[in-house]
Amino acid sequence: MAPKVTDARNRNFAQNRPAQHYYHLLEKFEAGIELTGTEVKSIRSGKVSLKDSYAVVKRDQAWLLDCHISTYLAGSYLNHDPLRQRRLLLHGEEIDKLAAKTQEKGLKLIPLRLYAKGNRIKCELALAKGKKLYDHRETSRRRTIDRETEQAIRAHRHRQR
């Protein structure tokens, strides 16, 4: 079987790995992003960070805040501000739904990853609820138990051979 070739047009540019540690991810959405040309080039070269970024709904529009996209080196005077607010492109019903849930239930919108879908750059958002300290401990405990169980099963299988 031939090795899987990852197409440059369908790859992850950035991931928000700590999001699963700090939040319970309830529901995921796919959104487009309104970007300038230098931002697109910078993202495609991997100069983007989703750490500490979040999304909000203001005046019937969704916005991505604190997403750091480094300036494009060959951008000259047309370069962008690395921390500017970027509009997220969602359907009206989705925006209304997100606005209602974030206001009423105290949920947050967290970007999980930036990726290419065809020629477009998309952002995967999640409705998230913050974890408490005991949730972190429970997750860690569960992960340790799963790892030890897996090791015991492997050792048992190895002894049977």
Image: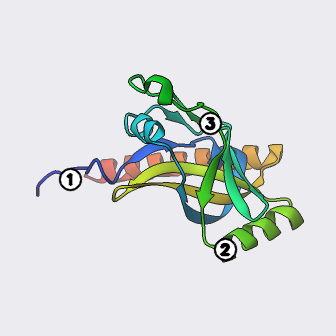
In the figure, 28 relative to 86: above or below? Answer: below
| Residue 154: x %, y % from top left | 38, 49
SS category of the residue bearing label 3: loop
Q: Residue at x 59, y 39 (%)?
A: 50
Tell me whether the residue at label 3 lies in contact with that at label 1, contact meaning CB atoms closer than 8 angstroms. no
| Residue 72: x %, y % from top left | 44, 28
Q: Residues within 10 Å of mark 1 (few under 14, many from 20)?
A: few
Residue 101, quarter of the rendered image: bottom right
Q: Residues within 10 Å of mark 2 (few under 14, many from 20)?
A: few
SS category of the residue bearing label 1: loop
Outermost right residue? 104
> The residue under label 1 is which amino acid type?
Lys
Callout in the foreground (3, 1): 3
Work out how far the residue at label 3 is from the one at label 1, CA to CA, in angstroms.
29 Å
Tell me whether the residue at label 3 lies in contact with that at label 2, contact meaning CB atoms closer than 8 angstroms. no
> The residue under label 3 is which amino acid type?
Lys
Residue 134 shows in this picture: yes
Q: Residue at x 78, y 66 (%)?
A: 99
Outermost left residue? 1
Judged left or right of residue 108, residue 153 is: left
Label 2 belongs to which residue?
Answer: 92
